[in-house]
Image (spheres, grey):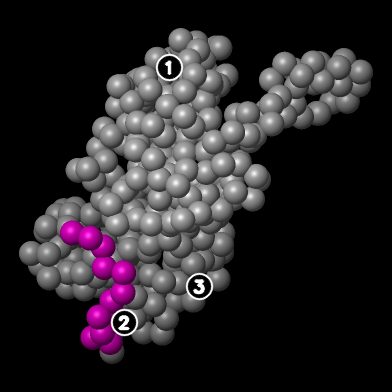
Amino acid sequence: MTDQTIAFLWPEVDFRSSGVVVPDGFAMRFGRGAIRAEAIATCRDADYICIGSGFGTADKELLDLAPSLRLVQLTGAGYNNVDHPECARRGIPVCYCPGLNAPSVAQTVVQLALRLIRPLPLLQTGGEAEWLAGRKAHAATAHEVGGRVGIVGYGHIGKHVAKLFHGLGLEVVRSERAGQDDGAVPALPLDELLATADIISVSLPANDDTSGLIDARRIGLIKPGAILIHIGRGGVVDDTAVAAALEDGRLGGAAFDVFEAEPLPETHPFIDLSETAGARLLMTPHIGGQTGESKTRNFQVAIDNLLRVSRGEEPIYRAPA
């Protein structure tokens, strides 16, 4: 019997280091989903496609290369980089891994908040001059993390963010949404949350309801001196308005792990900030959920799911259409 082929759109080293085992009867091909030529070569005649959430696109061109395709499996919580109507037309299930990277992403939010609020000077060479300069720089910028944390997007990630900030002794609120209930975390209208929170964490997915949600008007509502951390999906926050708020000094700081266009374009408004504004901005290359532990969880669920499909069973965690 010929092995079934898994097109795994991740670097092979990531999969091998996860400890997840290739199941018997399957052959795996690897290629980076964000490198189009590699994705095309990897997906040709594949029976299953495993692709990262937000890294490359499983579109009609890739689907055409795999006429016997049985499953598109996302290895993360996002699912907007798949052509869902085309998959539905072909009867191909699309599945994802909700919540498995939430601990890693939430820890990234806290790490970014700490770095913005209390940047630490690191000793490298030793000696009195470096020592005194470090103490002087620290005295000018160091603050305790405190006040109110406002969480915009209270799903798996938002709940973990709340838990961590509660552990630090901070007040936590969330943006209200129909159907959500949590007596430990009060809900506020979004505009009120933005106007009163000292730390704002945005962890919303990208869809028609969230596109442009934190627009220029809402950026203008943010409490002077507050910090904004965006670890959801690009396009939810108006980056140009954030850049302007950093330049005029009203926004205390910002940290972005996600962008509407990735990789980050050289023409992005964050690139040309003044030195003063740029010092209050942190940018990371969409790595909030990319820890060894989260990859192991996601990869194992992905492999288990394609095994279900191979046996004719219903897969779990179907992505919303």
Q: Is residue 107 above or below residue 119?
A: below
The residue at 46%/56% (across/down) is: 183
Q: Earlier in the sequence, mark 2 or mark 1?
A: 1
Q: Is residue 116 above or below residue 34?
A: above
Tell which tag, 3 or 1, sits nearer the viewer.
1
What's under tag 2, amino acid-wise? Arg
Tell me if residue 314 is in the magenta stretch: yes
The residue at 39%/77% (across/down) is: 304
Q: Earlier in the sequence, mark 3 or mark 2?
A: 3
* Spatial CA span between label 3 and label 2: 16 Å
Q: Earlier in the sequence, mark 3 or mark 1?
A: 3
Mark 3, residue position? 20
User: In this orientation, does residue 236 appear?
Assistant: yes
* Identity of the residue furthest to the bottom in this view: 1
Mark 1, residue position? 245
* Identity of the residue furthest to the left in this view: 89
What's under tag 1, amino acid-wise? Ala
Mark 2, residue position? 308
309 vs 245, left or right, is left
Classify 10 Å Cα crowding around label 2: few (below 14), some (14-19), many (20 and above): some
Classify 10 Å Cα crowding around label 3: few (below 14), some (14-19), many (20 and above): some
Residue bounds of the magenta highlight = 309-321
What's under tag 3, amino acid-wise? Val
Locate residue 191, reporting x and y percent: 35, 31
